[in-house]
Image (spheres, rainbow, N blue to C red):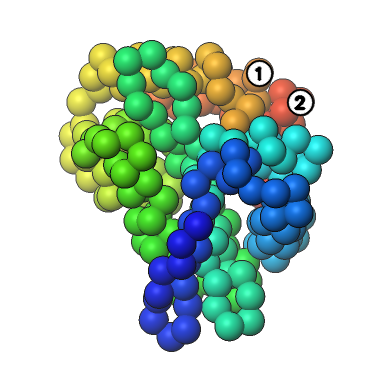
Amino acid sequence: ARGSPLPRGRFVRTYDQPGRWMTDAQLAELLDTLTAIARSSIGAVPTHRLFDAAHARAVLANRIVSVAYDHAGPLGFTAMVYLDCPADVVVHLGLTMTGKRGRGKRLQSALFTKSLMLPVLNLGRMSYHVTNCAASPAGIGNVSEYFFDCYPSYLRRARRKDHHVRIARHVLAHFRSEFGCSHLATFDDRSFVVYKSNDPAGGGTHQFIK
């Protein structure tokens, strides 16, 4: 884990695959921090694998977790996840939440920058694939603005390519539980819409849909 300075007394601490090396007490403390941020953000703990305290070590073994702090405590976090895809290095952007005190403080860039550098350092690669399952147009917009060769994208006329479809199909076939996607959801590989992804009947993280 490393600290990163931010303006006005804020900093980001990043934990690479903490389930592989943290003690039980450290894992419990980290999960408590993530849970507290989630409660502050939406008033509830989402039905999401990240908050599964009974299996915290396994859940956090393949995740990159960055937490933003100030002098009074945690402000927000992002928790990305390495996904095992044949012939591709894939990092799913996962879950980002900001508590009430962190709103309007532009934490996302600092959280993402540190997290996204780790695959470069760990794997010795200057490029890799990123996936995302957005519940709002803003989520799609953020990915379109920050990443190259995105599909779909609102910034320009994006072209769907074979690797977009191949990776999306594989991720949805094998890793839905990693990002709170209902097993009853259906994927349209023309529009790239995952219909009913947050359906609670299939284990979807329904708390994000108002």
Q: Residue furthest right?
A: 54
Q: Nearer the viewer, residue 139 or 21?
A: 21
Q: Secondary structure at mark 2?
A: helix
Q: Secondary structure at mark 1?
A: loop
Residue 89 place in picture, x, y as percent: 35, 27
Mark closest to the chain's N terminus, 1 or 2: 1
Q: Is residue 96 above or below residue 122?
A: below
- Toward which corner of the image does residue 53 lie, by quadrant? top right
> In the image as oriented, which residue stretches furthest toward the bottom?
8
Quarter of the image holding residue 55? Answer: top right
Residue 154 in view (yes/no): no
Mark 1, residue position? 184
Q: Is residue 72 left or right of residue 153?
A: right
Left or right of residue 52, residue 67 in this image: left
* Mark carried by residue 201: 2
Say which amino acid is labelled 1: Leu
- Closest to the observer: 159 or 63? 63
Residue 96, x across and y down, in percent: 53, 52
User: Which residue is depicted at the point 21% across and 39% down?
Assistant: 126
Circles 1 and 2 in contact, beta carbons < 8 Å: yes
170 versus 149 height, above or below: above
